[in-house]
Image: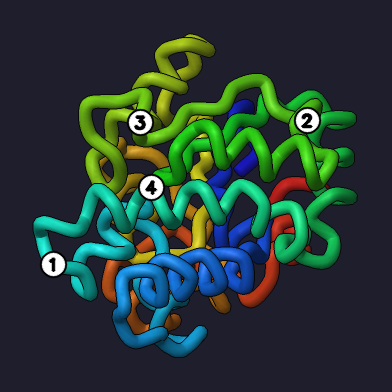
Amino acid sequence: MQNIKLIIFDLDGTLVDAYPAITRSFNYAMCKLGLKPQSASLVRRLVGRGDANLLKPYVAKKDLLRAVRLYRNHHQRSLLKHSRLYPYAGFLLRRLKQKGYKLAVASNRPSKFSLILLRHLGIYGFFDGVLCADQCKHGKPYPEMLNRIIKRFAFKKSQVLYVGDMAIDAQTARRAKVKAVMVTGGSSSRLEIKREQPFKIIPAINRLTELLLP
């Protein structure tokens, strides 16, 4: 890990707990469409592949665009009220910057909402780059986001670490041929993450200090 120069982070479930905001916006869209609200635990399991994929299993195809509009209109307000940094995340980012690491975000969230989160939670300034699925041809688990960030900073892949919380994050890192550290407690179970064979699985984001800040 001594060779790592660039650390790319996922957002939801990794640095940020926005699950209450997501659940509220999801169920707002459901109610507006006359559909059954879903539990927070179920919505949590659906997070990670973008808002359209979040809604798609519960909405008729003809109503999906309307559902996404309803969700997004609600979500820009919900994020401001019902999202928070995970404990230690802000301190970790500050220390990593002080140590000279380049930091970036790769998220399947639309860029508008990623930026709302980063600015509202006061961590936008720590990042040297933010790239989201709506700015790419393919989102995760395709490696495009990671590859574009790596190319921008001109690092070797051996110098890059990707930090996420889902099996899809571990898949993305493997396809991009970079090391992955996965945090449990997000949208994927430890077993689901373990099946993807990441470099390391940690129980909380603060444990990243043991790997990067000796």
**Does 19 appear above or below 211?**
below
Q: Is residue 53 visible?
A: yes
Q: How many numbered tags mark residues here?
A: 4
Along the line of sight, the residue nearer the viewer: 34 or 107? 34
x 79%, y 55%: residue: 89
Residue at image mark 3: 134
* Left or right: residue 186 compared with residue 43: right
Q: What's the amino acid at mark 4?
A: Arg
In this rendering, the label closer to the viewer, 1 or 3: 1
Residue at image mark 4: 69
**SS under mark 4:** helix
x 82%, y 30%: residue: 97
Mark 2 or mark 3: whose residue is earlier in sequence: 2
Query: Disc 4 versus disc 1: distance between alpha carbons?
Result: 14 Å
x 61%, y 47%: residue: 76
Residue at image mark 2: 126
Q: What's the amino acid at mark 2?
A: Phe
x 74%, y 52%: residue: 80
- Neighbour tally class for label 3: few under 14, some 14-19, many 20 plus, Cα within 10 Å: some
Along the line of sight, the residue nearer the viewer: 195 or 138? 138
Mark 4 or mark 1: whose residue is earlier in sequence: 1
**SS under mark 3:** helix
Mark 2 or mark 1: whose residue is earlier in sequence: 1
In the rendered image, residue 165, in percent from the top left (x then y), is placed at 50, 64
In this rendering, the label closer to the viewer, 2 or 3: 3
Residue at image mark 1: 60
